[in-house]
Image: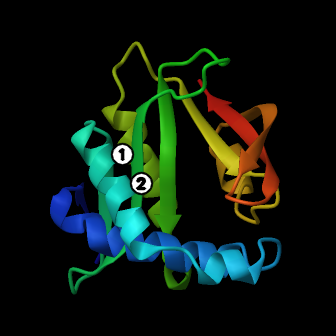
Amino acid sequence: MIKYRIGNSKDIMPISKLLIETWQNAYKDFIPSTFLNNLDLEKQVRRHKKYMALNTKYFIAENEKGQIIGFTSYGKNRFENIDGKNELYTLYVDVAHHGNGIGYALLNLVLSDLEPTQKELLVSVIKKNPFKYFYTRNGFIKIEEEMIDLEGFELTGEIYRRE
């Protein structure tokens, strides 16, 4: 049985590990292994501490053993050139649990948490991300492309909006 809850500072280490593992699995076909193998756990920990301190909202999915198997976070829109109040920053599910509806449940927790008059949600996705169709299946529409700088190389990203 999967339990969903609001994330807190105790979750920072496990979500940082899950993010790195997810990147290493999902993006290995198009992001250089040198980059993926050098993803820095402490950097991810600092990043999530900063976001939590800025009141970024996290939702967590745990298995029956209390292990985090998915998470999502959202907050204020960071795109300067795109109107919209809210942005989905992260949505990661352990690869062993793909296809079990966890991503859908996490996304719905975010959508339910948005203010009734501010349901619009933006998300940036790497264009070659094999899971980007999750967003179009859940009502997001591609509105723009962007370049994503990953410390030494760039990838094309796509920005999606759900209204």
Q: Is residue 84 above or below residue 23?
A: above
Q: Residue 123: percent from the left, percent from the top?
A: 60, 39
Q: Residue 17: percent from the left, percent from the top?
A: 41, 77
- Residue 64, can we see it? yes
Q: Locate residue 2 relative to residue 16 in the image: left or right.
A: left
Residue type beneath disc 1 = Leu
N-terminal of the pair, mark 1 or mark 2, is 2
Q: Residue 150: percent from the left, percent from the top?
A: 68, 57
The residue located at (21%, 80%) in the rendering is 66
Residue type beneath disc 2 = Thr
The residue located at (33%, 21%) in the rendering is 115
Q: Is residue 155 above or below residue 55?
A: below
How packed mark 1 is, by other alpha carbons closer than 10 Å (few <14, some 14-19, many 20 or more), is some
Instruction: Name the front one of labels 1 and 2.
Output: 2
What residue does disc 2 label? 72
Q: CA distance from mark 1 to mark 2?
A: 9 Å
Q: Locate residue 27 relative to residue 3 in the image: left or right.
A: right
The one of 155 and 110 positioned closer to us in this rendering: 155
Judging from the image, what secondary structure is the residue with disc 1 in?
A: helix
What residue does disc 1 label? 109
